[in-house]
Amino acid sequence: MKINIISIVFICFVFAACEDSTTEEPIENETTIEATSDKIQQEESLSYMLPSPLQIAEIFKNSGLNFVGDLTNPKEKIASYNTKYNQKLNFGIYSADMAYCIINNQTQPAIDYLHNLKQLSEKLWMTDIFNSMGLSKRLESNIGNHDSLTIIMADLQILLDDYLVDNGMGYTGPIIFAGAWIETMYLGAEVNKTNSNEKLIYRLSEQAVVLDNLIKALTQADEDNDFTELITDLKKIDAHFDVLETNEDAVLTESQINDLSILIAQVRNKIIQ
């Protein structure tokens, strides 16, 4: 199953199978069956499309996500992530931190987080992603060039998505994105605490749609019940968005955002500890 973690579409696309309106019964041969199977797989692969960490960060940035020091996950903590599960989640965490630094022109921290991602990629057998692009050199040679840094990170996400699918690791995509989503929401909520902003609150509120898709993607990928605790935690966060269901234009109140930020921080701290 391919989970597109770099899609610009923030809402779930559900592809309904189109029925053929011909009057004759189709002849079911091997070609027909194979084509139908391929179509079903393609529809399933596109069912839960998720944005990239950079896309969310850029949207938040345009709504007031300014840089606040000491909010990101310390790069030194990478040494404590010894299980594949924690490495995947924190690959997402560090991806979001790098995006946060890039959109705020914090180039050296962005380079530091890129090095963390490279270390984690080696533990997750994804080293080829970084070697094929010369990412470190490209990033370091574009210090101060926001547009180039954005393109570099977008390239990384495209390669990551393709690599996971090509190597039968599509289930890893939702886990990585879960870490990135949680970290971006954490950063947004914490920045809002320091300087409450209506636009930022609106962006935090609209993430209910992305979270819904994320939970579905994780549930679909969780064939061995490895992500049960994470899904449960995300469903608790999702419950805080229930107040928006009766009004599509509604946004969370300041009090509701504060309650949400507490829960997100708890889930995030569990991941990075």
Image (tube, rainbow, N blue to C red):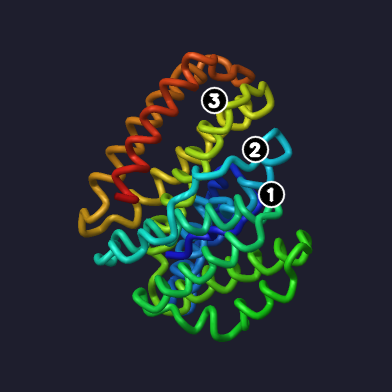
Categorize mark 3 by other alpha carbons within 10 Å: few (<14), some (14-19), many (20+).
Answer: some
Residue type at mark 2: give it: Leu
Report, in whole angstroms, how far the alpha carbon at label 1 lies from the one at label 2. Answer: 9 Å
Residue drawn at (63%, 42%), measured in percent from left and top? 67
Compare residues 155 and 225 and report the one nearer the observer.
Answer: 155
Mark 3 lies on residue: 193
* Rendered view: 202 above or below 100: above
Residue drawn at (30%, 59%), measured in percent from left and top? 86
Compare residues 49 and 14 and report the one nearer the observer.
Answer: 49
Callout 1–callout 2 Cβ contact below 8 Å? yes
| Quarter-of-image position of residue 111 | bottom right
Mark 1 lies on residue: 104
**Which disc number belongs to residue 70?**
none
Mark 2 lies on residue: 65
Residue drawn at (39%, 61%), measured in percent from left and top? 76
Q: Position of residue 265 (x, y in %)?
A: 38, 35
Callout 2–callout 3 Cβ contact below 8 Å? no
Horizontal arrangement in the rendering, residue 231 relative to residue 127 (left or right): left
Compare residues 224 and 79 and report the one nearer the observer.
Answer: 79
